[in-house]
Image: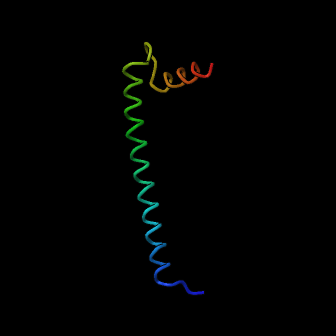
Amino acid sequence: MAKSKLVKANEKIAEKVVGTFGKIEDTVVQGYTKIEDAFVDRYLTKDGETVAEAKKRIHEESQR
């Protein structure tokens, strides 16, 4: 069954909206991660500890 022009137009709009939302979401998450890493690096790492190690240690401590 053939789709009407309106249905096809709505599908194109929906694809564009979903794609744009995904890009925005990725950008926000990346920005948050940079801020989080900077905070952990500045305030929560111990001597010689990397950011990843500090995050892991903090996560393990919070699970107790």
Q: How is the image coloured?
A: rainbow
Residue 17 position by quadrant = bottom left
Q: Residue at x 43, y 48 (%)?
A: 26
Q: Residue at x 43, y 49 (%)?
A: 25
Instruction: Pick the quarter of the image with the C terminus.
Output: top right
Q: Is residue 45 above or below residue 5?
A: above
Q: Residue at x 38, y 35 (%)?
A: 34
Q: Is residue 61 left or right of residue 25?
A: right
Residue 62 position by quadrant = top right
Place of residue 29 in the rendered image (x, y in percent of width and height, measured from the top left): 43, 42
Pick out the residue farthest to the bottom. 2
Place of residue 47 in the rendered image (x, y in percent of width and height, measured from the top left): 43, 12
Pick out the residue farthest to the front. 6
Pick out the residue farthest to the top. 47
Which is nearer the eye, 23 or 8?
Answer: 8
Q: Residue at x 47, y 67 (%)?
A: 14
Place of residue 2 in the rendered image (x, y in percent of width and height, measured from the top left): 56, 87
Q: Is residue 51 above or below residue 25?
A: above
Instruction: Pick the quarter of the image with the N terminus.
Output: bottom right
